Image (cartoon, helix red, strand yellow):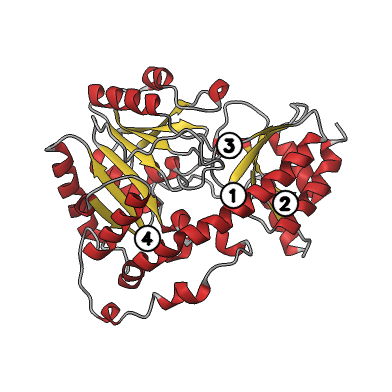
Amino acid sequence: MNRFSRRTPGSLRPNALARRAAELAAAGAPVIDLTLSNPTAAGIAYPQEEILAALPDPRCLRYEPCPQGLAATREAIAEWHLRHGARLEPSHLVLASSTSEAYSWLFKLLCDPGEAVMTPRPSYPLFECLAELESVRAVQYPLAEDWGWRLDVASLKASLDPAARAIVVVNPNNPTGTYLQAEEWLRLQELAAMRGLAVIVDEVFFDYAWRETAPRISSLAPPHLALTFTLSGLSKTAGLPQMKLGWIHVAGPEPLRREALERLEWIADAYLPAAAPVQLAAARWLELAPLVQDRILARVLANRDALRACVAQAPAWRLHEPQGGWSALIEAPRIHSEEEWALRFLEEARVLAHPGYFYDFGREAFFAFSLLPAPELFREAMRALSQIFRSI
């Protein structure tokens, strides 16, 4: 009898919210999507000619496989990080097609089947899926809500699974937008080194701080007492998710770092996923990244202001402002479940939003609103939602 791997879901049936959104779309009913995460679909002005001009490189016609990625591309990535104060060696970088693929490689590198990786709660709902696909368990550790969902190393230590091989941190966390602090980083490195654990830090949103003075530290900064992997990519850094290029930086004590890099290169050699045209164009796209980032951040902050004004008129609702990223959190009165509220947004305001359970918040009722949509659409969504907000 045919059967499918238990690494795939037992059921692929969408939930009630997704079903209703699909029904409205099929009926042609206009819905404002506040779950939007694709900047190329948000009406943001890109330097199109400059982006496309980087692609027609005659070197694309010759196949030259390099497991770590082309040296010139890795040098351009190192130069990008140097502009932000992080000095790293291009030889310590490995290129992948995305950060999702980078996670899969790292789970392969660090874990045998049945072992575990520690993942933050709340956070983006990707880790369990990627871990399952590698026959690895994703075990959650709580972020401290009272501190704005900051990393609490004591709670992490208390949550450690005996079979844990790595700790995943998202910096800033998605969707709470909370950055790592220097003291937390030191304590995390001490704990990981003492327990023989690797640290994996996802920094795709690192450049999108809402205030230049926001206190934060990058995982590229020392100390690296434990084996440390920093992930980023063009998807957020340059606002180009369609170009499919991510990277992993490997740091930590020698010779552990060297062996990890050699083994990671061996894994990369089995896939060789990074396309030559994208690698050859990446240096130019990183030169354009500050312009794209400024436009995306301007959009995010303008929509944040519209959300602020909307919530200010509704005392029963609360806005939780992140330190960075592309989304904001609101907390709803707990007179309805998150799914009930989300369905009401959809039915009465024609607005689709992510309920907190999507991110595994420890309690109700939270919603993540994308701040990427076009300002006129976002303001329209706020006008429609304000009627619901003020009815409480």
Q: Earlier in the sequence, mark 1 or mark 4?
A: 1
Disc 4 marks which amino acid? Answer: Leu
Mark 4, residue position: 245
Q: How far, Cα to Cα, is label 2 from label 3?
A: 29 Å
Dot 2 falls on a residue whose secondary structure is helix
Of the two numbered discs 1 and 4 in the rendering, the one whose residue sits closer to the viewer: 4
Of the two numbered discs 1 and 3 in the rendering, the one whose residue sits closer to the viewer: 3
Determine whether label 2 and label 1 are within 8 Å by CB.
Answer: no
Q: Is residue 140 visible?
A: yes
**Residue found 78% across the figure and 35% down from its top:** 312
Q: Residues within 10 Å of mark 2 (few under 14, many from 20)?
A: some
**Residue found 25% across the figure and 23% down from its top:** 195
Q: How far, Cα to Cα, is label 1 from label 4?
A: 31 Å
Q: How far, Cα to Cα, is label 1 from label 3?
A: 32 Å
Q: Residues within 10 Å of mark 3 (few under 14, many from 20)?
A: many
Taking depth in this image into account, of 385 and 218 the one nearest to the observer is 218
Disc 2 marks which amino acid? Answer: Arg
Mark 3, residue position: 322
Q: Residues within 10 Å of mark 1 (few under 14, many from 20)?
A: few
Q: Earlier in the sequence, mark 2 or mark 4?
A: 2
Determine whether label 2 and label 4 are within 8 Å by CB.
Answer: no
